[in-house]
Amino acid sequence: MKVSVILIMLLLFCNCKPLKIQHEVKKNADTLILWQHKDYIQDSVYGISLNKWYQEDFKNTKNKIIVATIDSQIDINHEDLKGKFWVNQNEIPNNGLDDDKNGYIDDTNGWNFIGVGDSNLQAFVNFEFVRILKKYKYDFENKDTIQLQNKPIYREYKRAFEKYLDDKKYYERYLKEENVLISAYYPAKDTLHYYFPNDDYTFKQLDSLYQLHKGVEKRFAERVDYDVPSERTFSDLIYYMRMIKRYNFTIEGMKSSSQHNDSIVHKLLNLNYDDRKKIKNYQLEKGYGNNNLNSDQRLNSHNTKVSSVLIGNRNNYKGVKGFHNNIYIMPLIISPFGDEYDKDIANAIYYAVDNGAKVINMSFSKQFSLDQDIVTQALQYAEKRNVLVVHTSGNASSNIDVTPFYPTDFSYLNNTELTQNLITVGSTSKRIDSTLVTPYSNYGKNNVDIFAPGEDIYVAIPDNQYTYDSGTSLAAPMVSGTAALIWLYYPNLTVQEVKKIIVESGITIDKKVVKPGTKNEMVPFSELCKSGKILNTYNAMKMAEELTKNK
């Protein structure tokens, strides 16, 4: 079988390992490791100028502020995050009672909305487009489509069905190709051992050997359904091991990736999979879930990374430096393997607002929303209580003015803005040329407010380790950290004022850049977001100071 380019994803899965960097390298706070804190004039990189603020304007404050991270589970014991978690002073830990009467039992540091029982969680859930198909299947399946064409929900159902068919075809083929390589690995290794007793063959050696035999036994490599190990020829086995060597796959990495994609096919895309069986399905009741924020080692990495950008200890000469040591994190867990439930998103927002969070960071996104109204109502609730919500734009290289991404403050149906307290963030790199915008970042003249650093960001990962990572998920906490810093020093500003400050104080990029998702299509940076700017924390703090003086 010719292994398709789909396996490039396997290459990434197998070979992207955390980069362990010793603490000694981090002792100099101004190394290039934290490029995102640098200043364009001083350092020739479009960082957020946080270092400049600390050098010129930093002063102590007794104020404290809470940022809620609505995200995955988190490593609550990480050395760079310890002591920086919100503590519910009105709750007695682990007594099995709801001491503060807020509807959640023993919520001492946050809440896990996908928790099951006392310590587990629902790790696998459907994609949102699968939920849409499940909900409306009997309303629209085998019905007169001509009469349904003008119904918005039918158009969304149709869009979900097309997405489902595409993903199902893609991942089923992807999984099959992975399993072919896995099943061929040991037979190929045993066969080649005769010619290479030390198993020290290279890709070039295998390629030469394959060229000698492929003319005689060519047929197998052209077929996509020929995957029975006993029927493989010598050239087939060389072909597979050649592919494995070419991309430095390991049997462990391939098995792990196969398990990952098997879950996508049989759970996330499965119309018969009940992903809410153990969690209450009522719309907006309180109290479901549990207080365990760190029960699944597979799902605690993302929030650890995001939170380290915000609260990494600035004084311990280890790992990451956050925005300020007086910022505290309230972890609210809603992100499993699959798409988040709108119900969980809404309840997490309500929880954050009711329990004192001033900023809410949402570093997740999805292309469909089954219950956008309940999330919108939660965002409006937050706006009335002066809480800012920061959201990642997403990593699909898409124009989200055209292709919906949720959660959002925008109604795609009515083409209207629904709240004034949400900032959507795209991602930039440390390059200052035409590739300034990261190629994966979503964009939108109307629906992305501002860009911020989101590539090659040094972050904490579980087990007291650190790595570089990229994504709009890391651009969002740059904005959340800036908002928290503003309110630490200027607490009387309104949420609308803080949003305006962040958006208007950025650095204007007056040049053309490569449009995400294209190889060389050049567009003005101003066409990719509403402000045409990159976040600048120093400027934001200056503007906040000036606005406060004039109030």
Image (cartoon, rainbow, N blue to C red):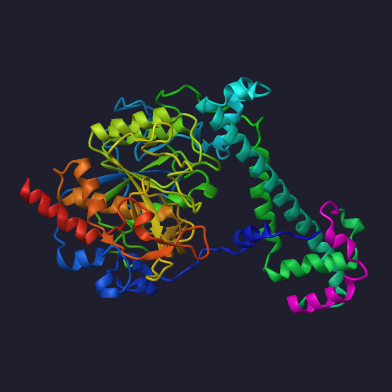
- Look at the image and tell me in which quarter the N terminus lies: bottom right
In which quadrant of the rendered view does residue 454 lie?
Answer: bottom left
Is residue 71 toward the left or the right of residue 149 in the image? left
Residue plotted at (48% across, 68% down): 20
* Count of marks, rendered view: 0
Q: Toward the viewer: 89 or 58?
A: 58
- Look at the image and tell me in which quarter the C terminus lies: top left
Q: Toward the viewer: 265 or 512?
A: 512
Residue plotted at (65% across, 58% down): 10
Residue 433 in the image: state x and y as whole percent: 39, 71
Is residue 54 toward the left or the right of residue 87 in the image? left
In which quadrant of the rendered view does residue 510 lie?
Answer: bottom left
The range drawn in magenta is: 203-227
Residue plotted at (35% across, 67% down): 34
Q: Does residue 155 lie above or below 203 as drawn?
A: above
Q: Does residue 71 lie above or below 536 as drawn?
A: above
Q: Toward the viewer: 500 or 384?
A: 500
Residue 466 in the image: state x and y as whole percent: 44, 63
Q: Does residue 453 lie above or below 110 as drawn?
A: below
Q: Is residue 210 magenta?
A: yes
Would residue 433 be seen by someone viewing this image from the given angle? yes
Residue plotted at (42% across, 44% down): 401
Residue 497 in the image: state x and y as whole percent: 19, 44
Name the residue furthest left: 550
Residue 38 in the image: state x and y as whole percent: 29, 68
Q: Is residue 367 magenta?
A: no
Magenta: main secondary structure equals helix
Is residue 335 toward the left or the right of residue 490 in the image? right
Would residue 290 be seen by someone viewing this image from the given angle? no
